[in-house]
Image (cartoon, rainbow, N blue to C red):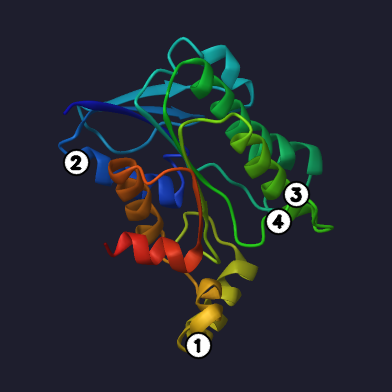
């Protein structure tokens, strides 16, 4: 089997790990990257499209693949303007899903967040929930939404609040058992592995909580 994958957000923490995994995966012969900046990884499998992701619809002719992995996301601290924040966290994934549907791509896997709820009074959670809702409305045959909790690992940029939160969660993680497991901090490696597994097994339209992501990555 020789597949083509699209990754949105390959320069980010999880997307970069996923890219490395797909490069090593013999099922993939081409990996198309749609990004604002080039990745530092070199591989004959990689085809880069350095574009304005806020105008992704202009790239529809090149947006052809077997699967789309959407790892796009920002933070309120990094993007304080709510309009821009929504254009990134809602607009890019939903536009990608729209193009995927129009171009006959049957598998769409997207990172959301714990607490996503289109009816939430919290802007961050509401934006993620609206993104999920409108992607599901596209009715792509194999659609998977991942809702990780706080993501561990080392980012390129320093985020003080996140670093403090990770320190606290490292202490709390062992105490979060049973129904509270979904609140445990999760490593980006687990998220990337889960995405890779979902693309291979195609279990149907599904929304996975953080603990389910870990379980799937361990299969």
- Residue 86 in the image, given as x and y percentages of width and height: 73, 40
**185 and 201: which one is in front?**
201
> Which mark is nearer the camera, 2 or 1?
2
Q: Which residue is mark 4?
A: 77
Decide: marks 3, 2 in contact (CB < 8 A)?
no
Decide: marks 4, 1 in contact (CB < 8 A)?
no
Q: How many marks?
A: 4
- Which of the numbered marks, if any, corresponds to residue 67? none
**Residue at the far right in the pictured view:** 121
What residue sits 67% from the left and 55% below the top? 116
Task: Count residues near mark 4 (Cα–Cα under 10 Å), then give few for <14, some for 14-19, many for 20+.
Answer: few
As drawn, 219 above or below 82: below
- Is disc 2 placed on a helix, strand or loop? loop
Q: Which sits earlier in the primary sequence, circle 2 or circle 1? A: 2
Q: Is residue 153 visible in this depiction of the protein?
A: no
Q: Which residue is mark 1?
A: 171
> Which mark is nearer the camera, 3 or 4?
3
Q: Which residue is mark 3?
A: 118
As drawn, 118 above or below 183: above
Q: Which sits earlier in the primary sequence, circle 3 or circle 4? A: 4
- Is disc 1 placed on a helix, strand or loop? helix
Q: Which sits earlier in the primary sequence, circle 4 or circle 2? A: 2
What residue sits 32% from the left and 54% below the top? 193
- Is disc 3 placed on a helix, strand or loop? loop
Q: Which residue is mark 2?
A: 25
Question: How many angstroms separate mark 3 from mark 1 (CA)?
Answer: 31 Å
Q: Quadrant of residue 99?
A: top right
Q: Which sits earlier in the primary sequence, circle 3 or circle 2? A: 2
């Amino acid at each position: 089997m020789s597949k083509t994958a699209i990754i949105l957000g390959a320069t980010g923490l999880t997307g970069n790990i996923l890219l490395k995994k797909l490069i090593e995966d013999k099922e993939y012969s081409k990996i198309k990257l749609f990004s604002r900046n080039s990745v530092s990884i070199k591989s004959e499998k990689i085809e880069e499209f350095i574009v304005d992701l806020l105008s992704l619809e202009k790239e529809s002719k090149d947006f052809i693949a077997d699967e789309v992995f959407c790892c796009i996301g920002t933070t309120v601290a990094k993007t304080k303007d709510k309009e821009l924040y929504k254009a990134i966290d809602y607009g890019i994934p939903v536009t990608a899903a729209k193009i995927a549907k129009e171009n006959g791509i049957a598998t769409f896997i997207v990172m959301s967040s714990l607490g996503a709820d289109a009816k939430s009074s919290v802007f961050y959670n509401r934006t993620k929930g609206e993104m999920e809702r409108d992607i599901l409305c596209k009715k792509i045959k194999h659609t998977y939404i991942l809702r990780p909790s706080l993501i561990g690992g080392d980012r390129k940029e320093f985020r003080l609040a996140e670093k403090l939160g990770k320190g606290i969660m490292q202490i709390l993680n062992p105490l979060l058992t049973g129904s509270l497991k979904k609140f445990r901090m999760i490593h980006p490696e687990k998220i990337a592995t889960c995405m890779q597994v979902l693309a291979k097994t195609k279990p149907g339209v599904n929304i996975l909580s953080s603990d389910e992501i870990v379980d799937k990555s361990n299969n």
